[in-house]
């Protein structure tokens, strides 16, 4: 019975703490999720981050060069040599 009461008190305490700190926790989680989505998008799209340490002096958002896009689109997967196997009777 004593263990049940301790578990119940801990759960109630956690619920109260969550009610108190819900907004800051959710704001922090939302900000982290947005940073991850933005980083993933920029990585897939090939954009340079204008707010990184190397580009702090520039205010304009940079897009990738056209030559980079052409080279990237023409790039193909390199596969090994084709081997033709023959059946032995």
Image (spheres, rainbow, N blue to C red):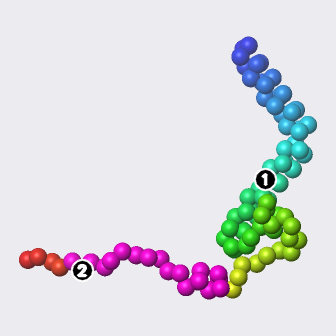
Please say if 38 is above or below 23. below
The span picked out in magenta is 67-85
* Screen quadrant of the C terminus: bottom left
Membership of 46 in magenta stretch: no
Give the residue at x 36% y 74%.
80
Would you identify the image quadrant in which residue 7 lies? top right
* Observer-nearest of 77 and 27: 77
The 10 Å Cα crowd at callout 2, few under 14, some 14 to 19, many 20 or more, is: few
* Screen quadrant of the N terminus: top right
Q: Earlier in the sequence, mark 1 or mark 2?
A: 1
Q: Where is residue 5 in the image (x, y as percent from the top left)?
A: 77, 18
* Observer-nearest of 43 and 56: 56
The residue where tag 2 is placed is 84
**Left or right of 18 on screen, residue 87:** left
Give the residue at x 53% y 81%.
75
* Observer-nearest of 57 and 40: 57
The residue where tag 1 is placed is 32
Badge 2 element:
loop
The 10 Å Cα crowd at callout 1, few under 14, some 14 to 19, many 20 or more, is: few
Give the residue at x 76% y 78%.
63
Membership of 74 in magenta stretch: yes
Give the residue at x 83% y 28%.
12
Please say if 85 is above or below 28. below
Q: Where is residue 37 in the image (x, y as percent from the top left)?
A: 74, 62
Would you identify the image quadrant in which residue 15 lies? top right
Checking the image for residue 80, the label placed there is: none
For the residues labelled 1 and 2, the Cα–Cα distance comes to 52 Å
């Amino acid at each position: 019975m004593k263990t049940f009461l301790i578990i119940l008190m801990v759960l109630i305490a956690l619920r109260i703490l969550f009610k108190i700190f819900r907004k800051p926790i959710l704001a922090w989680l939302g900000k982290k999720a947005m940073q991850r989505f933005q980083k993933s998008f920029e990585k897939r799209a090939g954009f340079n981050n204008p707010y990184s340490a190397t580009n702090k002096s520039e205010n304009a958002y940079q897009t990738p060069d056209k030559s980079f896009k052409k080279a990237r689109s023409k790039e193909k997967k390199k596969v090994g040599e084709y081997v033709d196997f023959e059946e032995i009777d």
